[in-house]
Image: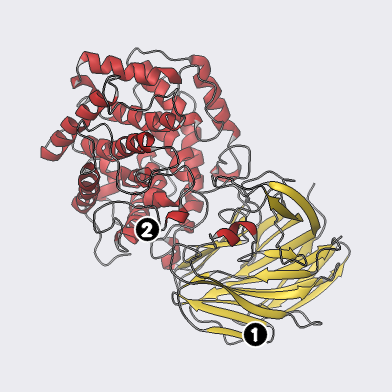
């Protein structure tokens, strides 16, 4: 934990600074806020609407926390009231993009409706009747609109219609029932929620799919609609948070995995929501500290920038981290991570003593069934790693390319996947790939999860994939998923991971390989920044940002080639980005074993492994670098 905690006053100063800097880039009538920077993927009008709506989230929290009183709340009420009047005026040059004109307006309308409800006594009730009528007219096209995607967007229609219901506007009970039923199809094991039918597990689980149900149930128009759901949603949130808090690094970094990472400290939102909902399994002090560590991770690393603005990036501007739909105001969805300021100073989330993150207290090991993750956090360096055998943002059997944001074998709180063009077209970091004679790398999206479990003090997970090369169609816009195009079969590829502390024993077998598959390449963690490189025999290692990424051959037989791939600008954490790798001949039916390591100081002792396959099981015995000796039976047949 930080030596000195933030007080609520510190949080308010942080929020006020963000709002003040953003408002300097507002249009004269306050309806649009357009920070400097290249035009977003949907045009300047959408950029300006995003700027208003997403900062209105933060302003709404600030107003609610002060109960509409005091100089700051009074100023924000006046300022955003003017923007509401201007944006809904059809004759204003600053008028907002309508819901029927661009789909992104449907997203932003939900933030507007949610804050109008939260600040109802101090804002909505004081608006002129004509402005209230125009707002209802602006939001009304959501009713009966069948074009909302069946992902987290269902909550945008739900929130808007619930607000309309509360102000005697139009709404559809059938729409509400449909959207709630769709949300229920997202439910997975242990409180996890997938963003649609695909294996799309990322920060949206917390900052959208758990956040909106909790806030929606408190809206004035939701009392009858939420009946019978609140307890179940709270139980799901409670269970999810037990996993989510294990995914935060000791330095407060969220996991660098999934799309929309430019929202940064929005990752703190589910911890505030847990306190708001009164979940029983984590104390208010632990929830607040988790949120604080995340926000302060960025605040201590130059966020916002010297001009007070949130940029497209992580610690600093790095536009490639954004998706194609993002604009200069998109990062202000980070406002969700400051939800706690909506709560009064005497709320338990503010008054309870802070409690540390799990990885700050002990080494952690956890299996999370829904996304297919083994979580391993090490107290010595504070890094949380996941080994991924279940998430690819696709459905089983897909032949799409791998998204580096989802389909890598490993992610962590201290590394980022390679996100340059090669990261999308030719996976290597935290991957096992087949290379053809032209050097093209295969993809594993569409994989089948074989197992995810903790066996003693070792995590065990495995997956099988029809590895395939993808000739991607040109001109595809990055929305987070992998590239699509003509797929060519490479091989049946089985990968098992045994995880202990900073180490992953990675077992690989190739079967039914295509003639074109001439090499098997295994990539380690991508590390950013300058530092030594070591390539010797069956070992390759690279150092960056005080971390060593190392991959070591543990198999007998043919000695592999080894090397380190260099990406001059491959990720948001620094330059260059380097990936150690090993390369083997393709030997179908043979098990290969490698040690994949990410730590501050590699263990001097070797890792040893013995493999014995019999009776449909692979019997693995590992002597780890710390001296521990562990046996693990692995059932080789797929789970039916």
Colour mapping: secondary structure
Q: Residue at x 68, y 43 (%)?
A: 395
Mark carried by residue 312: none
* Image location of residue 392, percent across then percent down: 63, 50
* Element type at mark 2: loop
Where residue 629 sits, quadrant-wise, is: bottom right
Which mark sits nearer the N-terminus, 1 or 2? 2
Check disc 1 and report its element: helix, strand or loop. loop
Dot 2 alpha-carbon crowd within 10 angstroms: few under 14, some 14 to 19, many 20 or more = some
Q: Position of residue 61 (x, y in %)?
A: 27, 38
Q: Check the image and name the residue furthest to the right.
A: 615
Is 524 left or right of 620, judged from the image as shown? left
Nearer to us in this view, 90 or 23: 90
Reply above or below: 192 against 166: below
Q: Is residue 384 above or below residue 153?
A: below
Which percent across, then down, holds residue 189? 60, 44
Residue 131 vs residue 292: left or right? Answer: left
- The foreground one among 320 and 203 is 320
Residue 488: horizontal and vertical position, in percent? 78, 53
How would you rate the neighbour count of disc 1 (Cα within 10 Å): few for under 14, some for 14-19, many for 20 or more?
Answer: some
| Vertical arrangement, residue 531 with respect to residue 29, above or below | below
Q: Residue at x 82, y 63 (%)?
A: 516
Q: CA distance from mark 1 to mark 2?
A: 40 Å
Residue drawn at the location 33% of the way across and 44% of the way down: 335
Report the front residue among 10 and 26.
26
Residue closer to the observer: 563 or 372: 563
Q: Which mark is residue 317?
A: 2
- Residue 606 badge: 1
């Amino acid at each position: 934990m930080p030596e000195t905690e933030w007080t609520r006053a510190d949080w308010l100063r942080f929020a006020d600074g963000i709002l003040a800097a953003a408002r300097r880039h507002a249009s004269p009538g306050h309806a649009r806020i357009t920070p400097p920077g290249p035009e977003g993927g949907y045009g300047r009008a959408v950029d300006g609407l995003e700027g208003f709506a997403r900062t209105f989230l933060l302003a709404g929290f600030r107003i609610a926390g002060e109960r509409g009183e005091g100089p700051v709340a009074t100023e924000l009420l006046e300022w955003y009231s003017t923007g509401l009047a201007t944006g809904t005026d059809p004759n204003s040059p600053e008028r907002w993009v309508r819901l029927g004109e661009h789909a992104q307006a449907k997203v932003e309308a939900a933030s507007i409706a949610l804050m109008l409800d939260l600040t109802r006594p101090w804002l909505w009730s004081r608006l002129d009747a004509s402005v209230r009528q125009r707002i209802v007219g602006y939001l009304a096209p959501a009713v009966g609109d069948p074009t909302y995607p069946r992902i987290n967007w269902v909550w945008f229609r739900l929130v808007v219609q619930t607000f309309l219901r509360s102000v005697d506007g139009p709404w559809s009970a059938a729409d509400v029932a449909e959207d709630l039923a769709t949300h229920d199809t997202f439910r997975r094991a242990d409180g996890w929620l997938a963003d649609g039918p695909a294996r799309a597990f990322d920060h949206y689980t917390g900052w959208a799919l758990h956040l909106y149900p909790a806030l929606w149930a408190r809206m004035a128009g939701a009392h009858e609609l939420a009946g019978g759901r609140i307890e179940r949603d709270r139980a799901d949130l409670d269970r999810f948070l037990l996993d989510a808090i294990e995914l935060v690094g000791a330095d407060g970094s969220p996991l660098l995995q999934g799309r929309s990472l430019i929202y940064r400290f929005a990752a703190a939102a589910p911890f505030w929501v847990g306190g708001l909902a009164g979940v029983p399994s984590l104390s208010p002090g632990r929830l607040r500290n988790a949120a604080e560590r995340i926000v302060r991770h960025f605040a201590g690393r130059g966020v916002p920038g010297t001009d007070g603005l949130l940029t497209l990036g992580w610690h600093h501007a790095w536009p490639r981290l954004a998706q194609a739909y993002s604009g200069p105001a998109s990062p202000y969805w980070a406002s969700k991570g400051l939800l706690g300021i909506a709560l009064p100073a005497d709320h338990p989330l503010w008054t309870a003593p802070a409690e540390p993150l799990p990885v700050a207290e002990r080494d952690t090991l956890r299996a999370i069934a829904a996304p297919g993750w083994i979580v391993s956090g090490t107290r010595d360096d504070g890094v949380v790693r996941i080994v991924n055998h279940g998430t690819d943002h696709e459905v089983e059997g897909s032949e799409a390319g791998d998204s580096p944001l989802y389909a890598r074998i490993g992610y962590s709180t201290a590394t980022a996947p390679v996100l340059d063009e090669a990261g999308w077209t030719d996976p290597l970091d935290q991957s096992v790939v087949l290379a053809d004679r032209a050097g093209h790398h295969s993809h594993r999206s569409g994989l089948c999860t074989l197992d995810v479990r903790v066996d003693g003090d070792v995590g065990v997970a495995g997956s099988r994939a029809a590895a395939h090369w993808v000739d991607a169609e040109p001109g595809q816009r990055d929305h987070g998923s992998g590239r699509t195009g003509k797929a060519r079969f490479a091989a049946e590829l089985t990968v098992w991971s045994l995880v202990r502390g900073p180490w992953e024993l990675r077992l690989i077998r190739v079967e039914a390989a295509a003639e074109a598959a001439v090499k098997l390449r295994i990539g380690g963690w991508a590390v950013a920044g300058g530092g030594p490189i070591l390539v010797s025999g069956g070992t390759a290692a690279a150092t960056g940002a005080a971390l060593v990424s190392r991959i070591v051959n543990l198999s007998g037989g043919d000695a592999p080639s080894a090397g380190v791939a260099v990406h001059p600008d491959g990720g948001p954490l620094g330059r260059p980005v380097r990936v150690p790798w090993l390369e083997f001949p393709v030997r179908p039916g043979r098990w290969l074993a490698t040690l994949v390591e990410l730590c501050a100081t590699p263990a001097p002792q070797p890792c040893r492994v013995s493999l014995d396959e019999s009776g449909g099981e692979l019997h693995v015995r590992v002597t780890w670098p710390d001296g521990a000796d562990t046996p693990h039976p692995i059932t080789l047949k797929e789970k039916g």
